[in-house]
Image (spheres, rainbow, N blue to C red):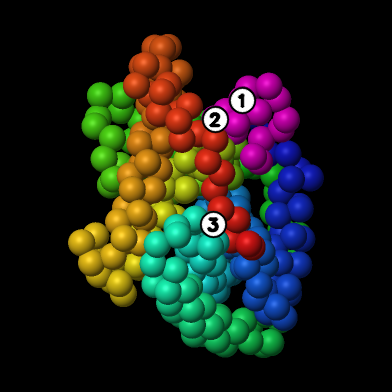
């Protein structure tokens, strides 16, 4: 199965637009779209192309530096959204203090991001994007679904205990596998595969967002015994972890043909209705 030609062209065009928006206004949504676009291009050129050319390596390196800066802003946007969505009558002052702290940290990271997207840098990247788009040939690409499946096969071991380090691995590889699969021509097989990846990505990503917020709160407010806010964040993070484990267990069961356990089903019903907070909130 080859890459959908229209899909590959859109990636170059959209990333250029997102870069311009990011350089003029680094709001939460613009930051998120740029990071997603750069990762899709990384998959297209670095994973689905038979060979990564020197000019393409330079382009990805330039984008990678900006994505790293944008990632620090994005992390704070997500933490702010999660904290604001948390309903906690106790310790309102500590919650306000933490919100203000995150806002201050975001302002610092935004200043660094603005420097990274200087006018001359943006101009150079736009030129390279146009050149890379013109030279890219989707007919020589690898099978997107085969590449995506291969990514997950690296860690898809049904007998391995699901730990935090393993969930971190799934968080990274599930994103990459989804982006790769989305380059495939539309089909029932591709749609089903991508839908499963989205469910897992949301569950694991949600857990990681709350874990990061909990770590930030612990660093500035103290541990559980010192703050009921931190204690509540630990409780939420624990629930998100159990939900992510349940979703991953179901995915493993589906791949092996086994039915999900009653425990996994109960955790999914109990926590699955909780939506991941929007960083644009």
Question: Counting residues from the N terminus, which is met first, the one under dot 2 or under dot 3?
Answer: 3
Quadrant in which the C terminus appears: bottom right
Disc 1: CA contacts within 10 A as few (<14), some (14-19) or many (>=20): few
Identify the residue under disc 1. 192
Q: Mark 2 vs mark 3: give the one in front.
A: 3
Alpha-carbon span between mark 1 and mark 2? 6 Å
Q: Residue at x 48, y 27 (%)?
A: 269
Name the spot of residue 212 as percent of width and height, x first: 38, 60
Quadrant in which the N terminus appears: top right
Along the viewing direction, whichever of 238 and 95 lies nearer the viewer: 95
Name the spot of residue 251 as percent of width and height, x first: 44, 25
Q: Mark 1 vs mark 3: give the one in front.
A: 3
Alpha-carbon span between mark 2 and mark 3? 26 Å
Identify the residue under disc 3. 85
Identify the residue under disc 2. 196
Question: Counting residues from the N terminus, which is met first, the one under dot 1 or under dot 3?
Answer: 3
The tag on residue 67 is none
Along the viewing direction, whichever of 235 and 16 lies nearer the viewer: 235
When the figure is inspected, residue 187 is found, relative to residue 45, above or below; the finding is above
Under tag 3, what secondary structure? helix
Q: Which picture quadrant has residue 253? A: top left
Q: Is residue 49 visible?
A: no
Which range of residues does the magenta coloring cover?
182-197
């Amino acid at each position: 199965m080859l890459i959908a030609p229209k899909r590959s062209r859109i990636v170059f065009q959209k990333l250029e637009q997102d870069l311009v928006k990011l350089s003029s206004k680094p709001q939460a949504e613009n930051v998120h779209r740029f990071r997603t676009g750069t990762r899709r291009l990384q998959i297209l050129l670095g994973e689905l192309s038979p060979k990564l050319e020197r000019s393409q390596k330079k382009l990805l390196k330039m984008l990678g530096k900006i994505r790293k800066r944008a990632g620090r802003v994005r992390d704070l946007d997500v933490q702010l959204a999660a904290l604001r969505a948390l309903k906690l009558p106790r310790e309102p002052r500590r919650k306000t203090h933490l919100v203000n702290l995150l806002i201050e940290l975001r302002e610092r990271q935004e200043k660094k991001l603005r420097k990274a997207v200087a006018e001359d840098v943006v101009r150079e990247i736009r030129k390279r994007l146009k050149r890379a788009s013109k030279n890219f040939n989707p007919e020589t690409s690898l099978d997107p679904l085969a590449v995506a499946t291969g990514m997950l096969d690296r860690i898809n071991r049904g007998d391995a205990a699901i730990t935090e380090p393993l969930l971190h691995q799934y968080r990274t590889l599930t994103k990459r596998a989804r982006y790769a699969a989305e380059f495939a021509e539309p089909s029932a097989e591709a749609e089903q595969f991508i839908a499963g990846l989205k469910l897992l990505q949301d569950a694991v990503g949600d857990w990681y967002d709350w874990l990061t917020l909990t770590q930030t709160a612990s660093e500035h407010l103290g541990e559980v015994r010192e703050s009921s806010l931190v204690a509540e964040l630990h409780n939420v993070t624990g629930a998100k972890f159990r939900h992510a484990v349940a979703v991953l267990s179901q995915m493993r069961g589906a791949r092996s043909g086994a039915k999900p356990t009653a425990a996994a089903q109960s955790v999914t019903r109990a926590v699955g209705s909780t939506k991941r907070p929007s960083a644009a909130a």
